[in-house]
Structure formats: structure tokens, C-alpha cells
Image (cartoon, grey):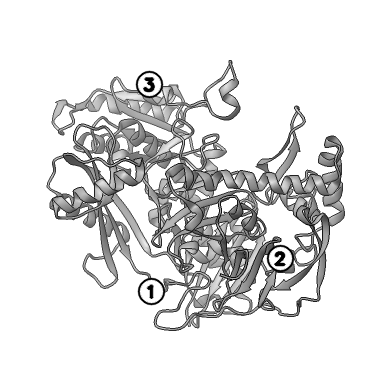
Amino acid sequence: MSHSIGVDVGGTFTDVVLRGPDGGISVAKCLSTHDDPADGIVTGIVAALGRRDPSLVTRVVHATTLATNAVLERRGVRVAYVTTRGFRSAIPLGRYARVEEDRYDLRFDPPAPPVAAGDCFEVPERVDHRGEVLEPLDEAAVTRVGEEIARRGVTAAAVCLLHSYVNPSHERRVAEILRRVVPTVVISSEVWPELREYERATTTIMSAYVGPVMAGYLRRLTARLAGIGITAPVHVMDSGGGVMSAELAARRAVATIESGPAAGVLAAAASGHPDVVSFDMGGTTAKTCVIRNGEPEITHEFHVGGKGSFGGRRAGTGVPVKIPAIDLAEVGAGGGSIAWVDPAGTLRAGPRSAGSEPGPACYGLGGDEPTVTDANLVLGYLDAASFAAGTMSLSLDLAEKAVDRRLAGPLGVSRAEAAHAVHEIANASMGSAVHVVTVQRGIDPRGFVMVAFGGAGPMHAARVASRFGISTVVVPAHCGVGSAAGLLAGDLSTDRVLSAPGADPVRVFAILAETAAADLNVTLGSPGVSVTRSADVRFTGQAHDLTVRWSDSPAELADRFFARYRQVYGIEQRGPIEVVGYRVRVTQTARHSLVGTAPGAREPGGPPKRPEAHDASGTAEVRRAAYFPELGGYVPVPVLTRAALREVAGPAIVEDAEATIVVPPGWTARLADDMSVILTEGGTP
């Protein structure tokens, strides 16, 4: 009789999915509470539980933007940086790229470094790239550094010594000494022992920066859940699509920076289609990712907090973090993105968001700036009475006033034209993210299926897909809470890496696997415990490497590297190779893991599970005026619920409890056996 809960805290809404022992799903959606996210989580869980006994909950899986927000809003703890003598300026100097409007700023000021120059310290010591000690550690100097850090009131320190990935002895001793006076000390050889000092340092700094924040938050959340009778362990989604315990997430908080977006990609991967463009549009941002052969792309370095970085792809923007992360592009285009007219008279939409406080103007919570949601309401795509499963009503009057005053008036156009322009600008912005993960990487998206979810995604998906020749869009059941559903598909897992050129692979993999298993508190070889091995490979003499799945056969490993090289760079090349790093992921299949529990998937050993149907009172006779420029403006269109849908030609609107699907002219929508809505351009597939 056990139940599992997935919780996704977004910038605007907190989504909760409850799965019972029979596979039945209950959902809840409420406004996020930014002062204390636990308030919104508890509200959503209580609503999803209904009259069920909270003690029956045996698993809670959480995706959170806490770490990301702490970096973006500079709300982490103050950190001191300790490194080898002669290298303290590496962090203050940093790496910066001028992007967006900064490219034209003759007085450009680079962003502040993650650690202020005055809080960077160095200690006499030196280890070479083979791990041999060239200069012993000066422990007296370390003691003086620790005393100075404590005197300044700094409570966290990040330690990254030169070449500590190959010989961590000095780094561990520095940590022992500093911990006498500094509460939190994080060392690079434990966080991510890889080549490249700068990236290793910034990853360690970010771990120290957000670790105490994450630890405190998870303690408070666990206590709040216990207060309503839920004593199940809390697990947290990591950036690579795995799930870790709350204790491990507190120690390795840097691994949760892309927690929320990763969960959504898992939901898209569970749709049953091998080649997918995942499209997740929420209230604050939109995220896209490519899934090939059922597996999402994984990157081992991204940048957080950068301008115009499209989710971390552009070097020199933000802080580089070297952890496994699902490779996605993210733009500031969501339902809450604010539309505005710039000084040059150009209409913009985003990246600034109204969030949940005060929210879009139509929420009636004090916001007076028009957003994408306001525009969609004015266009007739949204129903003011049934928004968010009817838990909150929208004000068309407030939306119209905001659009008139801030957009239509200044631009000298009609209200409908202004609202439709906002809708189209949001589509273009999201299209740029799809372009990044497909065309810019040499992928032709025309053979892919777009899987759309998020509260706002299905309203825009068909228009975005058309831009790339994608003719099929799948909108899974419970699409409005897709990320929360995806959480329940993740297994407990953790990653370990070590840069060790020329080392014995058998020995290195064994050490990494044992360390990762200890992180999860599991035993290697036990039922449900698996180990995935990969390696960082490069052509001999090159500076950069690519990660490929490991093979004990040198010839097969080389072939995999050559294939990956061709895929990434578009050229065929062969030659001598070398392995510079080793990676393992240890996974324990959770007892309550939703193998295919994302909407539309199969239960193990059984037929597709049909989710609980929503109210089917909507029929094709219900119509609403909606704006479609190719038809001349507002036209009456059929409005159906998902359960009432069989097949309908656009224009039409399909309303869910958590989302609304817009079927444009030239598209057809039909209901699949698994309750997914299939949109097809030009007719039924």
C-alpha cells in the first residue's frame, strides 16, 4: 500500500505527483512560495494526498532550483578560496565573454568573481602532474590562513591545490587543519578530481557556496514533512538524471544545480519515442533537450549564472561547473515572462519573470505588467475559470488592461495584435533554444518527435515545432506536471570521476565504484545495483577530450571515440588515442522506481496504464473565440477536455487539469491509447 511522491519546485508553480500502489496518479499544482519553498511543497502534498494516510508514503523525490537560485541571486554563503602559492589570482581573473548587449559596451565591467580577491589565500606546497611532491606542505602557513578566515567571519572554505586529483594528500591535510576553525571545508579531490585547475576550482567553490544552504533547506523540509506525518526518506534529483539521498545532496549540493530541468527530460524520455526533442515550458523558463535512442545527451561541463549562455553552452559566461548534467538549452521564456517595450520601441518578452509573486496581471495578486500568460488569455487560448485545475481563476479584465497600457498603446496597435506579437516572440525565443540543441550541433530535427509538457508548453509546442519541420508533437497525460512525474522514474545513483592518465583502468574503476557505492550506502554486486563505466579519451597530443562508454577492448574503445568525434565535430579522423580520465555511475534501482511511470508508459509486465480520466463534460459543441491570424483574427473554435477528445482538426483547444493544448490550423489532434494527445501537422500519422 506504499505511495511515492514527486515534487518539482519551479519559479512560478510547485507541482506534486502522487503515485499509489495500483499505479493511479493524483496531482496538485500550487503557487511556489519563495520565502520558504517548503510551504508550497506541504500545501501541494496535502492536496495530492487528500484523505490518504501520510504514513503510507515511502518515498519522496524532490527537484529543486535552490542551488541554481542561490548562484543566480548570490544568496550562497561567503566562501574563502585556498590554493597553491602563486595561483590565488586565477579565480579573481576568471574568464569572461562579452555576449548579448555587452558586446557593444565600451565600458564593460566583468561580473564579480565567485570569490572576492581578498578572500583568496595561498599556501606553500607543490605537487607535479605525476603526483610527486616538489615542495612539502607548510602546515604553519595553513594554520595562519585558517585563523585569518575565521577572523573574517567566513564559515566556508574551498580548497583546490595544483594537481591534487592525482595526489590528494596535501589537500586532505589542509582540510584537517582548516576544519579546526572553519565549519565547512570542501576539497576538490573529493568533489570532482579532474584535470583543469580553473574548472575544478570553480566546481569546488560552488559546492562550498551552496552546500550549507542546501543542507539547511533539506533539514527544514524533512522536519516539515514529518510534521504532516511523512517520515519517508527524501531524495533529490541530480543534474544528470539520477536521484541521491538528502544527506548526499547536502554534501554534494553542486550536483543539484540542474535538478529541475533534468526531471523533465526523464519524463520526455519515458514517452516511448526513441528520437525526441524535449520541450518544457513552465512559468519562468523554457528548456529543451535532444534524446536519441531513448537516452538524453549528457555533458560534463556547463556554466551557471551566465548571460546568454542557453543553459550553460557558451564558455566564458557564468561559472563553469564540471559535473554530469543533462545537456539542455534554457531560455528565460515562460508563462510569467514579462512583455515590455524597450527605449527603441521594440517589443520584448522576458527574460524577467513575474514569477508567483506578484505573478502575471491576470492572477490578481498585485502584478500590473503584461506577461505571456496574460497574452494567451487575451488571445482566448486560456480559460479564465479552469486555470490550474480550477484552483485559481484568472482576470481577463486585468490582462486586457495590462496589455493595453503597457503594449498596445505605446506600440500603436490593437490589443489582439499586441498579445499575438508577445506569443510569437515567446515562440521565437524558445525556438532559439531548440536551434541550439539541434541545428547548431549538426542534428536535423525533422525526423524527431517533440514531447511537450510544463504548464505552458502545450500552448506553444505546435508553433515551435513548425519552425523546424517537426510534424509530430506528443503531449503526455499529466503534461502540466511532467517534471514531477519524471522524478519518480529516477533511480538512486551517484557519479565518481578521476583524471589518471596512464593508470591501470581495472584498479581505477574498482576504486571509483567502491567510493560511489559508499556514497549510496549499497554493496556492489547486490541485486539492483549496477555500475556504468566510461572514459575521457582524446587524440594523443590534443588538449581536450570526449567521454565515451568504456570497453576493455582497445580497438572497440577507439572506434567508439572516433564515432563520437565524428558526431561532435562533423569530420572523420583517426589516429593514436589516450585515456585521460575514468568515470563510473553506480545505480540502485529503487523499489518504488516508476519504470515507465512518466505519462503514457507501460507498467512492468502489463499493458499501458490508462491514467485517471479527467471530467469529460467538455464536448465539441463547447466553443470559445480564439485568435488565429491565418484565419483573420478571432474565430470560434471547439474546446474539449482530453478525455472527451477522439480526433479533431485545428483550430481547436484541448483543456487539461494542469495545462492547455492549442491545436493550430493545419494540425490534427487525436487521443492515443495511453492518454497522450498526438498533434500532427497535415493530418493523422
Q: Residue at x 37, y 41 (%)?
A: 322
| SS under mark 2 | loop
Residue 117 on image: x %, y %: 44, 22
Q: Residue at x 57, y 38 (%)?
A: 73
Residue 275 on image: x %, y %: 44, 60
Q: Which residue is mark 3?
A: 89
Q: Which residue is mark 1?
A: 591
- Is 346 in front, or is 448? 448
- CA gap between label 1 and label 2 equals 43 Å
Residues tagged 1 and 2 counted as in contact (Cβ below 8 A): no
The amino acid type, in three-letter code, at marker 2 is Gly
Instruction: Work out whether 479 lies above or below 329.
Output: below
Q: Is residue 279 visible?
A: yes
Q: Residue 681's quadrant in the figure?
A: bottom right
Residues tagged 3 and 1 counted as in contact (Cβ below 8 A): no
- Is 669 in front, or is 122? 669
Residue 626 on image: x %, y %: 80, 60
Left or right of 462 in this view: 112 = left
